């Protein structure tokens, strides 16, 4: 009873903490100076159609590197925690099996599309990676005894991460700055080959995220 | 010169590739792993060197080819590189410590560890709020996963609680970050305008700050952290306690400029509250790692408040205070957690296993000393400066709470220490030698010592003499393999050389105390020649104590004085602890000494700054101490001199110390308190006092004298009897100082000198008896007069000198004291003192009657006289006593001139005749008359009493039953029971009960409060949420 | 669109309430996840500007006046990172629960209080 009251007090208290933020909230009328600079810079400096992408991959590239690291840590951590597991399984229906092997390639293709076009359209490495992982999830669902070649997964995961960093270092070596997009020609605005290193970075991120998520799902699924 | 961003790059790249590298063998992956960690240390160390020595300006690293605020930038300056150096270093050492685990465990652990260290580096360097969030998560997630490096039920559930708590905190942090962006339009710390965060913006910054604060584990929202400290592998715990904490406290430091002042004040107070409660709760803790957890949380609280309260201070102060607490906590906690992992005993009472491993024990001791804020470790300087700062800021309440909590910490740490060293259970198992673990711990202790020396040398510019006590310990430690006799000779030589070195003293009062401290010690040192075997560790600390005595005299500043004072405390504590059953005694001594030391810190902090370059003893005359300062200093000094109320450490310490240490403690150490009191007196009489404090001190002295005398009478243990006697005698001295008159001070100094001699002689005499009989219980002795005649003579002369009957020096002392009391008009006090002199006959009689007279005990038939090394110093002192009894001018004349500096002389000295306003005393004449009176009956006895029939002593037939323990039927057993009865309720040990009950209360409170840590993860989240709400409402928007 | 902000806060509070009131470890994690989602919605709402379009400068936007036509790209960038981090934490929490369950066969948080005081 005491605990329930305390929980109630805590929630009401929190509401009172948040209340001024909610009741006085107004949408901004104009972009902040920083945001405006990003929008302009995305056009003028990076040749990137998707402003969010230019923010994520270049301007705030360090965040993204960190984000990739966090996901990597989760993968490693879960592997460390769970190790090899065994469980009972029931085979999936034939319908699911057939459809999924048919869909698998399409989904992977779609994932690749998303991360290679991250600088042009909504989406990017993370989204693409997640889509790819769902393709593998589908395979796992349909074929419970499916085994992945962990070495390949690991190699993809490790090297895509390492290449991401190598691209970053190139910027540093060329004295532009770590994770700069301008290490290769920026290309023509709005085209697939544009935005400098952004699509390359996003592709590596996509591969990395795809392989990591697959790995997580596979670890959690057990054998 | 390597761009520090490579720390992040290299660690990450290695982390990504490590699982591939591992396919080529663990050896390779371990090599890469350790290389990267070492690389980090070197990069940061290099930069720190550049910033501090070469004066390079702060480095800013932009990323992505854009300048901040467009891109995220990193910054590396003095502060960053300093914090990172220690974080990386402890990270590396912890990794070395864990090498066995890393060899056996999954490669994932290496990856997680590497990225954890990378996370701290990023966290400290980045200047972008959201990037801080990202690095915070990197740090947290890798830590969460590493909590199960040793996987068991406990570490799993602790890890889960940690995750939930951390998750909630980071949720609030994220909310704070986005609202800071909403209000300020920026995420970069340099570009966020604090003015945009007024009104509702305060809530944004509040959310941000409280989240970081929760990560710093404030009371009571910190149960999760305790569970983690208790259950996780020691190597990882030290990383959490040190590396993670360092990173997070730095984040707090970074956002501090954004916080409104009232919120900062609240956090400062919350830090102090945390420090208080975690130490209070630590009192009850038995689990070693959880105890360290409490201490760790407390230290973080202290660090936060230090960070906040020093905000507007000069840089040097911030370095000493914040840097000092930071390094101190970091090093001590890392080292101690590692030692828990080596010892592998959960309960602190099982740590006796450590006492067989001298090397580890020394490391353990050094780390505990460092954590307790004793010199020369950084925490000592930090505490001194911090208290001074707070006192100047008039934050007395905070000062009180901090010092009380520190005292709690000292209590549980030293209880742990004494329980470990003095553990008397038989231990068969041995601590296995593991090179890596020993290596890390040794290195960290070494670093701590180096920093301590650097601080003494470069921050405070101390001269060699102030390090001398430590140098002595180190040199003797290195020479510990040689026989103790040679070490004793060396020590005697060192004391002589030291005396010669400080000899040209500024005034004769210093010289007087110099004789008590240095010459007295040198003579007492002769008794230690009787030591057999190696006596490892003894002479080092003995020298440390003697040198500290001397340093008290030559100290020129408050800090130098206090440093010597603390060295004296440390060395005497260790010497007392060497006694066989000295666990309780040494602990009590340490607790009371620490409390006294804290009072001194505050007292000195309140004192105005010194104006001359003379020794403190001299220059204090020109200083008018404020009332509060006088009171605190007086209490602090009176604790050391064992005054009534704070005396309970005294009998224990004097009795339980080794028998050749007791004379040092009793005859000399107590005089340090007298010296202190005299110094206050000097300041007091030279400046018009507004509050007659010494009147009350006088009463305390008088009561100490009588209570001490009564307590001494009821002792069965010869050393305890002498200890209470010392208490009583120092009571006389204190009372005489409090008279604040010429005659009073002459009496005080005269008695001090006298007491030094007779109490040394008596304690050494008892040492000799103990050496032969192996007992201190007086009723187990008897009839030793024939077996140990020389010792008998010493004791006889000693007790005559104490009792104050003619002809010996004690008579002069009493005469002077009564004269000065009557002159002052303190008749009642004089009456009480007179009565107490009568009481002292009771115990003195007992000493001679029970030990030397009566029947010899059967088991003592074959004992011999005490060894020559005990006889020599006794007789040196006896000669001294006889000399000043015969020729009192030898001492009265110089004392007259010393005290003449402070008061106009009220006595006239003419030949052997000393005249005061009340009459005259001729010591020489008294001696001659008494001799004459003595010789007449002696001659008569010799003439008429020739025919004495001797009976064989053990020729006894028992007429009836033989009693079970015959000694207790002896008249000497419980000798003054009837007096005790007559005293009624006054005979009860009330003061002892008072302190005992206070301790019980503190423990009960601690136990009560720690019940909030129910172990339920959900309750811990509730604590966190409620804490946030409460702080919000205290802040008020 | 201010309702999205309120919705975010409501979700946050519901999530926290769930964490405080549910005994089941999985439900506590679900609570955490809900709270996290609440925060994500709040972040996105903060970046919203009335009558503007997504910050993707394709044919729908006049590039020279883009600054007047798109919503704030920064919160969108932040929320992506936040989502990924939330996912990572949630996944790790769940695997802790899997291991805890393996050791004691219980999902009640009350069964894991052996460390206390």
Image (tube, rainbow, N blue to C red):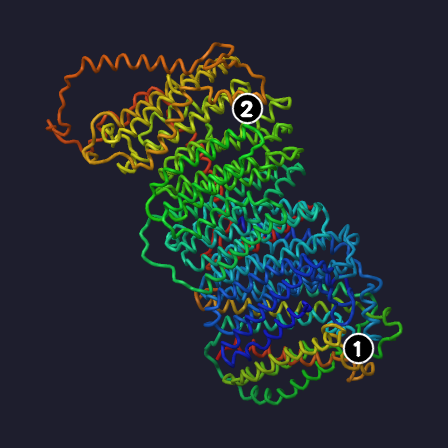
Do tags 1 and 2 sit on the same chain?
no
Q: Position of residue B140 (x, y in %)?
A: 59, 63
Q: In this orientation, does residue B893 appear? A: yes
Q: Is mark 1 on a helix, strand or loop?
A: loop
Q: Residue visible at 54% across and 65% down?
A: C26
Q: Where is residue B818 in the image (x, y as percent from the top left)?
A: 46, 15
Most foreground residue, B536 or B202: B536
In the visual, does B425 lie left or right of A9? Answer: left
Q: Where is residue B789 in the image (x, y as percent from the top left)?
A: 26, 28
Instruction: Kindly identify which chain the residue marked by label 1 belongs to.
Output: A
In the visual, does B454 lie left or right of B941? Answer: right
Q: Give the answer, above or below, for where B122 lies relative to B567.
A: below
Most foreground residue, B283 or B701: B701
Find residue B686 and report its image quarter. top right
Decide: few, some or many residues near mark 2? Use Cα within 10 Å; few <14, some 14-19, many ≥20. many
In the visual, does B772 lie left or right of B19? Answer: left
Per the image, the residue denoted by label 1 is: A48
Q: Give the answer, above or below, for where B533 lies relative to B875.
A: below
Decide: few, some or many residues near mark 1? Use Cα within 10 Å; few <14, some 14-19, many ≥20. many
Q: In this orientation, does residue C18 appear? A: no
Q: Position of residue B341 (x, y in %)?
A: 45, 60
Instruction: Kindly identify which chain the residue marked by label 2 belongs to.
Output: B
Q: Residue visible at 69% across and 81% down?
A: A203
Per the image, the residue denoted by label 2 is: B898
Work out which quarter of the rendered image holds the N terminus of chain B and state it.
bottom right
Q: Give the spatial CA distance, label 1 vs label 2.
A: 90 Å
* Disc nearest the viewer among 1 and 2: 2
Q: Give the answer, above or below, for where A197 lies relative to B643.
A: below
Find residue B580 and report its image quarter. top left
Most foreground residue, B97 or A73: B97
């Amino acid at each position: 009873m005491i605990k329930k009251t305390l929980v109630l007090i805590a929630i009401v208290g929190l509401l009172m903490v948040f209340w001024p933020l909610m009741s006085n909230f107004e949408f901004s009328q104009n972009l902040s100076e920083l945001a405006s600079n990003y929008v302009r810079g995305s056009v003028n400096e990076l040749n990137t159609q998707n402003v969010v992408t230019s923010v994520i991959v270049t301007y705030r590239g360090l965040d993204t590197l960190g984000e990739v690291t966090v996901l990597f840590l989760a993968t490693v951590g879960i592997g460390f925690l769970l190790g090899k597991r065994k469980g009972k399984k029931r085979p999936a229906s034939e319908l699911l099996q057939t459809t999924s092997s048919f869909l698998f390639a399409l989904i992977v293709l779609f994932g690749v599309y998303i991360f290679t076009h991250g600088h042009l359209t909504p989406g990017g490495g993370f989204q693409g990676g997640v889509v790819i992982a769902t393709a593998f999830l589908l395979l796992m669902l349909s074929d419970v005894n499916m085994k992945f070649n962990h070495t390949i997964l690991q190699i993809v995961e490790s090297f895509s991460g390492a290449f991401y960093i190598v691209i970053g270092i190139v910027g540093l070596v060329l004295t532009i700055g770590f994770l700069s997009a301008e290490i290769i020609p920026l290309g023509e605005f709005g085209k697939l080959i544009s935005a400098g290193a952004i699509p390359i970075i996003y592709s590596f991120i996509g591969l990395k995220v795809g392989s990591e998520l697959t790995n997580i799902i596979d670890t959690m699924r057990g054998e | 010169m390597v761009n520090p961003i490579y720390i992040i790059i290299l660690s990450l790249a290695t982390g990504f590739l490590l699982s591939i590298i591992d396919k080529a063998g663990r050896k390779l992956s371990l090599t890469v792993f350790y290389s990267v960690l070492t690389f980090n240390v070197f990069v940061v160390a290099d930069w720190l060197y550049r910033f501090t020595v070469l004066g390079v300006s702060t480095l800013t690293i932009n990323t992505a080819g854009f300048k901040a605020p467009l891109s995220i930038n990193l910054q590396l300056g003095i502060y960053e590189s300093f914090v990172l150096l220690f974080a990386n270093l402890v990270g590396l050492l912890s990794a070395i410590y864990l090498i066995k685990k890393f060899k056996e465990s999954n490669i994932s652990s290496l990856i997680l560890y590497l990225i954890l260290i990378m996370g701290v580096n990023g966290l400290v360097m980045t200047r972008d709020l959201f990037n801080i969030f990202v690095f915070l998560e990197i740090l947290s997630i890798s830590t969460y996963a590493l909590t199960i490096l040793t996987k068991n039920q406990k570490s799993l559930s602790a890890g889960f609680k940690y995750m939930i708590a951390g998750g909630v905190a980071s949720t609030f942090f994220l909310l704070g970050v986005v609202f800071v962006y909403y209000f300020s339009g920026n995420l970069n710390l340099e570009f966020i305008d604090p003015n945009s965060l007024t009104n509702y913006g305060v809530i944004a910054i509040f959310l941000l700050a409280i989240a970081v604060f929760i990560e710093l584990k404030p009371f009571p929202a910190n149960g999760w952290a305790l569970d983690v400290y208790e259950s996780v592998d020691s190597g990882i715990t030290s990383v959490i306690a040190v590396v993670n904490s360092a990173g997070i406290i730095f984040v707090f430091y970074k956002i501090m400029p954004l916080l409104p002042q009232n919120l900062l004040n609240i956090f400062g107070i919350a830090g102090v509250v945390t420090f208080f409660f975690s130490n209070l709760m630590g009192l009850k803790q038995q689990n070693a790692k959880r105890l360290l957890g409490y201490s760790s949380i407390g230290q973080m609280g202290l660090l936060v408040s230090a960070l906040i309260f020093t905000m507007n201070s000069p840089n040097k102060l911030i370095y000493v205070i914040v840097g000092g607490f930071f390094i101190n906590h970091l090093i001590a906690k890392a080292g101690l957690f590692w030692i828990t992992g080596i010892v592998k005993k959960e309960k602190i009472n099982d740590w006796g296993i450590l006492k067989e491993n001298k090397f580890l024990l020394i490391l353990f001791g050094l780390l505990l000393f460092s954590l307790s804020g004793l010199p020369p470790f950084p925490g000592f300087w930090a505490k001194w400066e911090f208290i001074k700062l707070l006192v100047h800021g008039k934050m007395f309440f905070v000062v009180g709470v901090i010092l009380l909590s520190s005292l709690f910490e000292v209590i549980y740490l030293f209880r742990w220490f004494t329980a470990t060293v003095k553990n008397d259970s038989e231990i068969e198992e041995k601590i296995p030698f593991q090179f890596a673990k020993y290596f890390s711990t040794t290195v960290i202790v070494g670093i701590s010592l180096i920093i301590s020396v650097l601080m003494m040398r470069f921050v405070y510019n101390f001269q060699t003499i102030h390090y001398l006590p430590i140098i002595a310990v180190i040199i003797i430690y290195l020479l510990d393999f040689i026989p103790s006799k040679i070490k004793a000779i060396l020590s005697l030589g060192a004391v002589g050389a030291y005396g010669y070195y400080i000899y040209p003293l500024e005034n004769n009062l210093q010289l007087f105390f110099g004789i008590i401290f240095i010459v007295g010690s040198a003579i007492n040192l002769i008794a230690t020649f009787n030591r057999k075997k190696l006596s490892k560790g003894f002479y080092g600390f003995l020298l440390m104590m003697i040198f500290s005595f001397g340093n008290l005299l030559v100290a020129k500043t408050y800090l130098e004085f206090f440093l010597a004072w603390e060295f004296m405390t440390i060395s005497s504590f260790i010497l007392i602890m060497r006694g066989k059953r000295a666990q309780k005694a040494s602990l009590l001594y340490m607790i009371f000494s620490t409390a006294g030391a804290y009072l001194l810190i505050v007292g000195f902090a309140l004192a105005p700054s010194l104006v001359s370059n003379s020794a403190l003893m001299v220059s204090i005359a020109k200083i008018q101490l404020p009332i509060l300062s006088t009171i605190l200093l007086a209490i602090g000094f009176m604790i050391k001199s064992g005054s009534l109320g704070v005396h309970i450490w005294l009998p224990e310490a004097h009795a339980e110390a080794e028998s050749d240490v007791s004379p040092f403690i009793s005859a000399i150490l107590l005089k340090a308190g007298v010296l202190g009191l005299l110094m206050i007196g000097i300041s007091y009489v030279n400046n018009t006092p507004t509050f007659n404090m010494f009147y009350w001190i006088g009463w305390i002295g008088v009561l100490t004298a009588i209570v001490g005398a009564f307590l001494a009478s009821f002792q069965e243990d010869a050393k305890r009897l002498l200890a209470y006697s010392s208490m009583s005698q120092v009571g006389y001295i204190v009372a005489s100082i409090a008279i604040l008159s010429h005659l009073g001070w002459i009496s005080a100094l005269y008695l001090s000198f006298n007491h030094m001699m007779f109490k040394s002689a008596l304690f050494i005499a008892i040492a000799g008896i103990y050496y032969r009989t192996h007992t201190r219980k007086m009723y187990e002795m008897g009839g030793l007069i024939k077996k140990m005649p020389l010792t008998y003579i010493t004791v006889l002369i000693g007790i005559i000198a104490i009792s104050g009957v003619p002809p010996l020096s004690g008579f002069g002392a009493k005469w002077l004291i009564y004269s000065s009391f009557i002159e002052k008009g303190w008749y009642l006090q004089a009456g009480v003192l007179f009565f107490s002199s009568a009481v002292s006959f009771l115990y003195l009689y007992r000493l001679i009657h029970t030990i030397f007279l009566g029947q010899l005990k059967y088991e003592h038939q074959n004992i011999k006289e005490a060894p020559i090394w005990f006889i020599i110093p006794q007789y040196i002192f006896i000669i001294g006593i006889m000399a000043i009894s015969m020729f009192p001018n030898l001492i009265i004349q110089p004392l007259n001139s010393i005290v003449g500096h402070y008061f106009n002389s009220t006595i006239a000295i003419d030949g052997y005749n000393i005249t005061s306003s009340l009459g005259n005393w001729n010591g020489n004449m008294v001696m001659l008359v008494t001799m004459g009176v003595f010789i007449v009956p002696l001659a008569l006895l010799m003439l008429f009493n020739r025919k004495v029939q001797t009976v064989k002593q053990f020729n006894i037939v028992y007429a009836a039953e033989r009693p079970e323990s015959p000694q207790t039927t002896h008249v000497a057993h419980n000798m003054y029971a009837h007096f005790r009865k007559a005293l009624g309720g006054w005979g009860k040990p009330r003061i002892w009960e008072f302190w005992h009950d206070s301790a019980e209360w503190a423990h009960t409170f601690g136990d009560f409060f720690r019940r909030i840590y129910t172990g339920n993860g959900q309750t811990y989240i509730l604590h966190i949420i409620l804490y946030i709400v409460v702080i919000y409402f205290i802040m008020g928007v | 669109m201010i309702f999205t902000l309120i919705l975010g806060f409501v979700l946050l509070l519901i999530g926290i309430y769930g964490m405080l009131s549910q005994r089941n470890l999985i439900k506590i994690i679900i609570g955490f996840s809900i709270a996290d989602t609440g925060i994500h919605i709040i972040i996105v709402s903060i970046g919203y500007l009335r009558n503007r379009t997504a910050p993707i400068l394709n044919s729908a936007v006049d590039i020279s006046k883009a600054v007047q036509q798109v919503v704030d790209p920064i919160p969108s960038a932040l929320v992506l990172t936040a989502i990924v981090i939330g996912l990572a934490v949630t996944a790790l929490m769940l695997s802790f629960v899997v291991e805890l369950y393996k050791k004691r066969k219980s999902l009640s948080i009350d069964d894991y209080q052996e460390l206390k005081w």
